[in-house]
Image: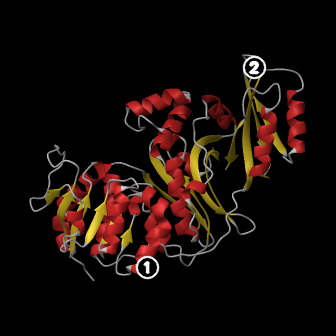
């Protein structure tokens, strides 16, 4: 059943402008498909600001979001400003007012998921849509909401941040170190002046918490997700990854452990070149879903950008106009969270050269219950700074934590070893 939509748009920046352009560009196509969409009001900080897009003549600029909420003709709010303050007030007010919501705000959903679900339960006629909240233009949200309900998902994992994937790709291709590629990413506009949210993994932290909810039905507080970023990854790690016929990617993972508990974490990973994730280059994103029926399903595409993200927003709007929206959070499962997962690990140890170091590392590994699979070492060019790598058989995270901490206490160690899972 087609539903005429009068949109109140909150935010007319990069993505908001893209949404306006896509509606204007496709209006004739929409009419032929009986999709009735129009923008009624656009809430912005400054009405006088110069825009890089054309605004429909019948759309009105306002600066107070209450004008969107209090307008009875507006039946859908599209929130595209981000953040968890003003955006939260608007989204919550919209739901209470019985207006449908389309948002790209992963931080808001991750931070206030239980409250949002409660509001939706109290306002059952409201549709809540957030395809653009994770991985920009990739339709991973809708797929997890609908396409695996007769399946059993075992793992959801992926590259969900374009900035860090761009940086890691440059480090691999050019042999550059972290600080060099960070400056380049900032100069190109991929990284913010304060890149912490991206490079330390906090952006992926919120995204994998959402995908864990959709894939497994468990509400995972985003701040509880153990997270390591890429700031400790160096050019030498790519040298050793190459020896392992692998690369390095920052990956968010939600997976079932052998005991049926759920592990959710963010970390750089050593990724085999045989793994599809190794092929995601530059600012691209990719998500893999492992399940009983489909084995491994791959979703890849642009993770950000005006039209890629606006396309996902438009998909939500179109489904709403066609009356084809779905339960935003279809599963509710009370899984136990246990982030002490088991896997093989890569451990880079930085030390001053000396006798007995390998023996010491082996003894500490035995003490910590860590089985060593291999030891890799490039030719030594500086006895005061030697990087060598230990790869392990499958061990639990707490064992590798203990192993790294014990190594860091030794007189030969220059710092805490860098470690990451091996895929």
Indicate left or right for 178 with 342 as reference. Answer: left
Task: Find residue 257 and report its image quarter.
Answer: bottom right
Which disc is residue 121 wearing? 1
- Front position in the image: 237 or 349: 349
- Assign the N terminus to one quadrant of the image: bottom left
Q: In this view, does 86 lie above or below 353?
A: below
**Is residue 159 something that shows in the picture?**
no
Residue sitting at the far left: 57
Left or right of residue 127: residue 148: right
Q: Residue 38 carries which label?
A: none
Where in the figure is residue 301, as x and y percent of width and height?
Answer: 43, 53
Residue depicted at x 50% and y 76%: 330
Q: Percent from the top left, x then y, of residue 408?
A: 77, 33
The answer to whether residue 59 is left or right of residue 44 is: left
**Sequence-first tag of 1 and 2:** 1
Q: Where is residue 153 in the image (x, y as percent from the top left)?
A: 60, 69
Dividing the picture into quadrants, the one containing residue 348 is top right
Q: Where is residue 123 in the image (x, y as percent from the top left)?
A: 37, 79
Q: Which of 298 and 222 is in front in this view?
A: 222
Residue drawn at (9%, 59%) of the image? 57
Q: From this viewpoint, is residue 269 visible?
A: yes
Q: Residue 380 carries which label?
A: 2
Mark whose residue sits in front, 1 or 2? 1
In terms of secondary structure, where does tag 1 sit?
A: helix
């Amino acid at each position: 059943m087609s539903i005429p939509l009068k949109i109140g748009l909150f935010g007319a920046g990069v993505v908001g402008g893209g949404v306006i352009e896509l509606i204007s560009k496709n209006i004739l196509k929409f009419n032929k498909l009986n999709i009735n969409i129009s923008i009624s009001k656009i809430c912005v900080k400054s009405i006088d600001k110069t825009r890089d897009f054309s605004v429909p003549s019948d759309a009105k600029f306002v600066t107070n979001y209450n004008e969107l909420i209090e307008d009875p003709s507006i039946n859908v709010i599209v929130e595209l400003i981000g953040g968890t303050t003003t955006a939260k007030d608007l989204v919550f007010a919209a739901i209470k007012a019985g207006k449908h919501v389309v948002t790209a705000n992963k931080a808001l959903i991750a931070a206030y998921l239980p409250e949002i679900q409660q509001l939706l339960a109290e306002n059952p006629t409201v549709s809540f849509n957030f395809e653009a909240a994770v991985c920009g233009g990739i339709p991973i949200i809708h797929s997890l909401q609908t396409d695996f309900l007769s399946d059993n998902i075992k793992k959801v994992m992926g590259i969900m941040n374009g900035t860090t994937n761009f940086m890691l790709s440059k480090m691999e291709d050019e042999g550059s170190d972290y600080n060099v590629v960070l400056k380049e990413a900032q100069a190109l506009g991929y990284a913010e002046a304060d890149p912490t949210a991206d490079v330390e993994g906090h952006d992926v932290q919120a995204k994998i918490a959402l995908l864990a909810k959709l894939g497994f039905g468990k509400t995972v507080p985003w701040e509880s997700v153990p997270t390591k970023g890429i700031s400790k990854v160096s050019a030498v790690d790519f040298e050793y990854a190459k020896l392992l016929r692998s690369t390095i990617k920052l990956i968010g993972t939600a997976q079932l452990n052998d005991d049926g508990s759920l592990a959710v974490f963010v970390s750089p990973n050593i990724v085999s070149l045989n793994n599809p994730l190794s092929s995601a280059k530059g600012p691209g994103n990719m998500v893999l879903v492992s399940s009983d029926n489909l084995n491994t399903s791959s979703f890849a595409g642009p993770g950000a950008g005006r039209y890629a993200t606006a396309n996902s927003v438009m998909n939500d709007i179109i489904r709403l106009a066609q009356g084809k929206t779905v339960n935003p959070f279809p599963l509710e499962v009370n899984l136990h969270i246990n982030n002490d997962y088991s896997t093989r690990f890569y451990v880079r140890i930085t030390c001053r050269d000396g006798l007995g170091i390998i023996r010491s590392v082996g003894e500490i590994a035995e003490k910590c219950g860590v089985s060593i699979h291999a030891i890799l070492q490039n030719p030594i060019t500086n006895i005061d700074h030697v990087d060598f790598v230990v790869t392990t058989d499958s061990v639990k995270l707490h064992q590798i934590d203990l192993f790294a901490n014990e190594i860091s206490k030794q007189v030969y160690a220059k710092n805490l070893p860098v470690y990451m899972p091996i895929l």
